[in-house]
Each structure stands twice: as C-alpha cells, then as structure tokens.
Image (tube, rainbow, N blue to C red):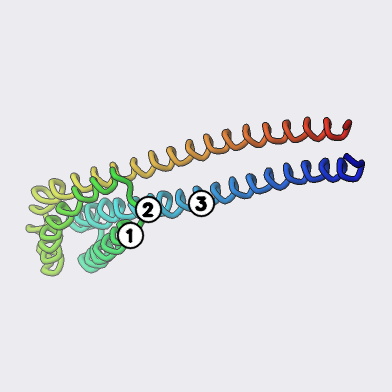
Amino acid sequence: LSVNLRLFLLVALLSSVSVVVGLMGLKGMSESVAGLRTVYEDRVVPLRDLKVIADLYAVNIVDTTHKVRNGNIDWAEARKSFDQARKGITEKWTKYKGTYLVEQEIKLVKEIEPMLFSAEATLNALQVILDKEDMPAMTRFTIDTLYPVIDPISTKFSELIEVQLDVAKAEYESSRDEYESSRTSKIGLLVAGTLTGILLAFW
C-alpha cells in the first residue's frame, strides 16, 4: 500500500474512534439529562406537593381547629385558613396524580382516594361549625371526629413521600450503573483505537 493510503487509514481510524467516543458521550449526556428531568418532574415536584398537602391537613385544618377552640385565633381567620386548605389540597392532589406514577404509587393512590372522599363529609361538617361559630360543637368535633379521619390520611401521604424518595434513589443508582458501564466501554474503545493507531503509525 502507498504511504498516502496508509496515512489515510491511520487518520480515518483515529477520526472514527473520536467520532464514536463523541457520540457515546452525547448519548450519555442525553440520558443523564432525561434521568434528571424525570427525577425533578416526577419525584422532586411531587414530593413538594405531597408535603404541602400533608401540611395543609396538619396546620390549616388540625391546628386551626385547636387554635379557634383555645381562642388563639378568631372564627374569621379559622374559616380563611380552612378554605385555603381545601382549595390547596384539591389543587395539589390533582397535580400530583398528573405526574408519572410507579406501581406502588398507583396502589397507594387507589387506597387514598376513598379516604379523601369520605373525609369530605367530615370537612363539610367542620365548615358548618365554623360558619355557625359553634364552640361546643367545635370542642366535640376536635375530641371525637378530627383525628380518626385525618390521621389515616396523613399516614398514607407519608407512605407516598417515602415512595418518592425510594424511586429517586433507584433512578440515581440506575444512572450511576449506566455511567460506569459507559465509562468502561469508552476506555476500552480509546485503548483499542490508540494501540491500533500506534501499530498503523509504525506500519
């Protein structure tokens, strides 16, 4: 073979190795970005929304009933806090269900939905008490009705939050494994291409 052809083969080989490694790098970066996007959109944001829902139940409903009963806030402020809670819960829950749900989430959502539906009757009763500013009824409601309804819901939301963390961890471990596999492949390709290039250079 002529010297020109040999030089062409050498350059072609090294250029091919560079192109392949570059394409593999671009593919790896694309997959990493996609993984980060799903972690943010389907785990981090839902985690925030679930935390907001849990806080609305705990603070705007449970704490508010105790505060109005103890005289720490007036009835008007209690009604405002309660309205914010109901609107916020509906908004955040609807938004959460619109994200990508894994199997465990779907199972928990199916368990939570009837609980939320049943809780509506209790919240409606609380709304009536707030509207009437009925302190004896508020006292009975706080002692007898509030916790048996809210506590199971709060527990289920805690389980959903744990699922978000577990899935985010699994996504991280999957990305880490893909990175290690890609790194090994690229190093192998670079070593093989370099050795072949050296042999061609001597030739």
Determine the residue positioned at 14% across, 69% down. Answer: 131
Question: Disc 3 residue type?
Answer: Ala
**Which part of the image, by quadrant, shows the C terminus?**
top right
Question: Disc 1 residue type?
Answer: Gly
Left or right for 45, reference 91: right
User: Where in the figure is residue 35, as x and y percent of width and height?
Assistant: 49, 48
Picture quadrant where residue 194 is located? top right
Question: Disc 2 residue type?
Answer: Pro
User: Where in the figure is residue 190, as x and y percent of width and height?
Assistant: 72, 35
Q: Which residue is mark 3?
A: 34
Alpha carbons under labels 3 and 2: distance apart: 17 Å
Q: Which residue is mark 2?
A: 46
Q: Secondary structure at mark 2?
A: helix
Q: Secondary structure at mark 1?
A: loop
Q: Nearer the viewer, mark 1 or mark 2?
A: 1
The answer to whether the residue labelled 1 contacts the one labelled 3, judged by CB atoms less than 8 Å apart, is: no
Category of crowding for the residue at label 1, using alpha-carbon neighbours closer than 10 angstroms: few (below 14), some (14–19), many (at least 20):
few
